[in-house]
Image (spheres, grey):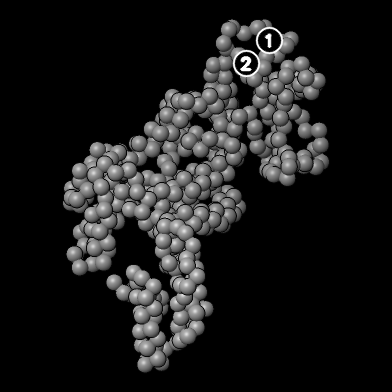
Amino acid sequence: MHLLKFADDMVIVAPSQRALQLKINQLEKFCRENCLIVNLTKTQVVVFRRGGRLPKDIIFTYKGLPIKIVNEYTYLGVTFSSSCLFRKAAEKFKTKGMSALGSLWPILFKGKVENWDSHYQLFSSIAMSTVLYASHIWGYPYADIIEQVQTRFLKRIFHLDNRVANYAIRMETSCTKLLSKIAKQMINFYIKVQLMDESRIAYKCMKALLVHLKPGQELNKYNWTSYIRDILAVSNSQDLMMKPGAILSEKQRILLDFTDFLRNNDTMRAQSSLKHHYCHSLQEENRLINLVNMPLAKLRLVAQTRLNNGRFYFRRHQTILGASPYRHPVQQPEPESGSGLLRLYHRPDRRPDRARKPESGRGPGRLRLPHRPDHPRVMREQMSGKVLLLERPGALFTFQATLMSRLHGI
């Protein structure tokens, strides 16, 4: 293989320094005979290697002028690094995804879109499509990087704190990691290449990778086919690696098993969590995504009740509720052993004419009550604010059930 051409772009491929210089000389001759001009300001050389610095005597020239040697190059929108890995590409696609989210917020908020399905459909069309561009080539080992775009969207929609666990908001909205979509694209691409004519370059490259794939070998970050085997192994289908027709017929089952695998990982994390332990036992019909008859503004309140650790966000500028896990010293008798209490306090706004000063310059100001029941500030809040006492376990569920009853007028 010597050239890769697409529109007005051309890539010269060579296995060694000498071979590349000879091909550049041939290109110079061809351009001179056909009265063509090469733009040297856009011409660069990438020497792919696993690490280390290049020798100083490596120089490539065109018409006697040196060609710049770089460590990365963007070809057809994908950043190729000299390390043959795609971490920088993932970081750049994450940045693009965050920018796409920035253009999405005015559509959602100014348009007053209330339906959750419409929100997620717009996110999929604008931001997700940007993040997942060509992700079947580079995305599998770096899915956690671009996953930040989806979690950012979910937390912003429901006005949740950035410290809320990602698995908790995914479980509440029945969303899976973007890795499931990457896996689908990879399986489709693998089947397509395997069914190509044997003379195609992509087919030859795939066969070369499969030759170097050792049985029982762990994931090889330099061998793309090892990721395919990892996906198939989730459903015990790794024996289908060399049978594209069988993979095609079993594709739905393979992808469904992989999606269930990702969801089970979130469930296991919830089971071992003290903060969001309730998520793993939450019935499907009670998840946020299934409260379809509730306006989005009320869904946000429910989401903050469950996930935001006692911090509530209202009217863009301030949080006026806080939570503290100590018992009331006067009004409430000693609870049964192990039950504990949860206090939800409402603090009257002491400065109604101006917004509270943000904490450390980041986001709206938040009320945080100290965790000592004898603290003077706590005593003031108990005297001047409203106190809601809830017994554990199930305190948040009790509060949420009462809240939903009020919202629906039950």
Secondary structure type for disc 2: strand
Marks 1 & 2, CB-CB < 8 Å contact: yes
* Residue at left offset 59%, top offset 40%: 162
* Image side of residue 235 versus residue 100, left or right: left
The kind of residue on which mark 1 rests is Gln
Residue displayed at 67% across by 22% down:
324
Q: For the residue carrying disc 1, how many other residues have a C-alpha within 10 Å: few (<14), some (14-19), or many (20+)?
A: few
Q: Residue 344: x, y in percent? A: 66, 23
Tell me the mark number nearer the camera, choosing from 1 and 2: 2
Q: Secondary structure at mark 1?
A: loop
Q: Quadrant of residue 377?
A: top right
User: Which of 404 and 247 lies nearest the eye of the viewer?
Assistant: 247
392 in relation to 145, above or below? above
Q: Which residue is mark 2?
A: 341
Is 389 left, or right, of 166 in this rendering? right
Q: Nearer the viewer, residue 193 or 382?
A: 193
Precedes in sequence: disc 1 or disc 2: 1
User: Which circle marks residue 190 in the picture?
Assistant: none
287 relative position to 103: left or right: left
Q: Which amino acid type is marked by label 2?
A: Leu
**Percent position (x, y) of residue 95?**
54, 56
In the rendered view, would you say 47 is above or below 335? below
Residue 340: quarter of image = top right
Quadrant of the rendering where the C terminus is positioned: top right
